[in-house]
Image: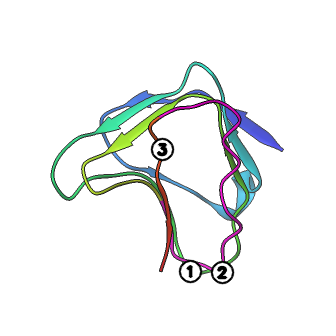
Amino acid sequence: MTTVNPVQTTTYYLTSSNNPITFGTGTGIDVSSASGIGVYGSNVQSWAVTNKGAINGGLYGVSLAGAARSPTKPEPRSAVATST
């Protein structure tokens, strides 16, 4: 499992090489534009995502387009999961 702690104002794109992934407590992703997505996983595979940090998006905090497992979110934070 990959653990990352990105601090950024742009979308974080999931890749096959970092799946499964944990966003650590130092994570601060804030894409607050109306159509912003904090973390995006395409439809190429299923994703396993754990969030221990802060992920904010104007549209979605976390958007998983593939056949996704629900994100694991052990602490109350602002990530919102979607699957299209």
Q: Position of residue 35 (x, y in %)?
A: 20, 59
- Quote the CA–CA distance across marks 1 and 3: 19 Å
Q: Position of residue 33 (x, y in %)?
A: 17, 47
Q: Nearest to the eye among marks 2 and 3: give it.
A: 3
Q: Which residues are magenta?
A: 63-77
Q: Residue furthest right?
A: 1
| Label 3 sits on residue | 79
Label 1–label 2 contact, CB within 8 A: yes
Residue occupying the point 77% across, 41% down:
2
Identify the element where label 1 is drawn. Answer: loop
Residue occupying the point 48% across, 44% down:
79
Q: Position of residue 39 (x, y in %)?
A: 47, 51
Assess disc 2: are there few (<14), some (14-19) or many (≥20) residues with their C-alpha within 10 Å of its C-alpha: some
Mark 1 or mark 2: name the one nearer the start of the chain.
1
Please tell me whether residue 9 belongs to the stretch shown in magenta. no
- Quote the CA–CA distance across marks 2 and 3: 19 Å
Identify the element where label 2 is drawn. Answer: loop
Q: Amino acid at mark 1?
A: Asn
| Label 1 sits on residue | 43
Q: Position of residue 72 (x, y in %)?
A: 71, 48
Identify the element where label 3 is drawn. Answer: loop
Mark 2 or mark 3: name the one nearer the start of the chain.
2
Please tell me whether residue 71 belongs to the stretch shown in magenta. yes
| Label 2 sits on residue | 67
